[in-house]
Amino acid sequence: MGQETAKRRVDMIRILLIIIAISLLIGCSSSSPAPKYYTLNTIPTDKNTEIYSVKDSDIVFGIGPVEIPDYLDKPQIVTRTAENELMLSEFNLWGGSLKIDVMRVLIENISSLLAPKKITIISWKTSVPEAYRIPIYLLRLDASANGSIFLKAKWGIVAKDGRTVVSIREFSITKPIKGNDYKDIVYAMSDVLADFSKEIVSIIQSILK
């Protein structure tokens, strides 16, 4: 009888230990921070936004393809902690594909910067005859450990015939990140993409004069 009672006590202790372990696991999982999702911003359109005008009308420009390095093409927001060292944030994520978001922002920015009803800006995937095309490769779009954002891109303009290269360009810019949060990193990325959009528009303007 004594042995049976002792065995029951041991079994009860084991059950209690299992319950405690499960409770600890639940507690740990519930204390993990919820992921945050981000998207890039377009240039705000207000009365202070500079609008670029051109003489030609009924001109179509297809933006793309837009390519980004493989290390950036991930759900996680990537930061550069050293020249050859990257960090992927587990809880700060893109709301969708970064590559698609970059193309969306460039299309919207360039559309808003060009004079209304003069130039049509579309995705390069849209089939439009006799449209210019602007392929873009972002070599870098990095937030670095020194608190700055760096964008470097190679891009060009292909004529309406789809073969003649009108212009080949390279663009780079560095700007400070105004803050220490991931939303500040995303805002800085949007800011340098706005400057890149203005550069593209200025070349479009010079070609169509």
Image (tube, rainbow, N blue to C red):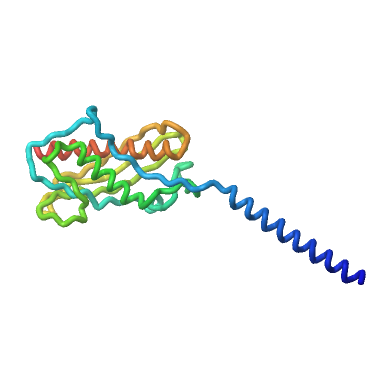
Residue at x 82% of width, y 65% of height: 10
Q: Quadrant of the N terminus?
A: bottom right
Residue at x 21% of width, y 30% of height: 50
State left or right for residue 146 relative to residue 120: right
The one nearer the camera, 72 or 8, is 8
State left or right for residue 185 relative to residue 48: right
Tell me residue 186's x, y (percent). 39, 40
Tell me residue 138's x, y (percent). 31, 46
Tell me residue 70's x, y (percent). 38, 53
Dividing the picture into quarters, in which one does residue 152 lie? top left
State left or right for residue 104 relative to residue 27: left
Q: Residue furthest top?
A: 48
Q: Quadrant of the C terminus?
A: top left
State left or right for residue 125 relative to residue 183: left
Residue at x 21% of width, y 40% of height: 110
Q: How many marks?
A: 0
Residue at x 14% of width, y 38% of height: 116
The one nearer the camera, 23 or 139, is 23
Tell me residue 160's x, y (percent). 11, 51
**Against 35, is 189 above or below?**
above
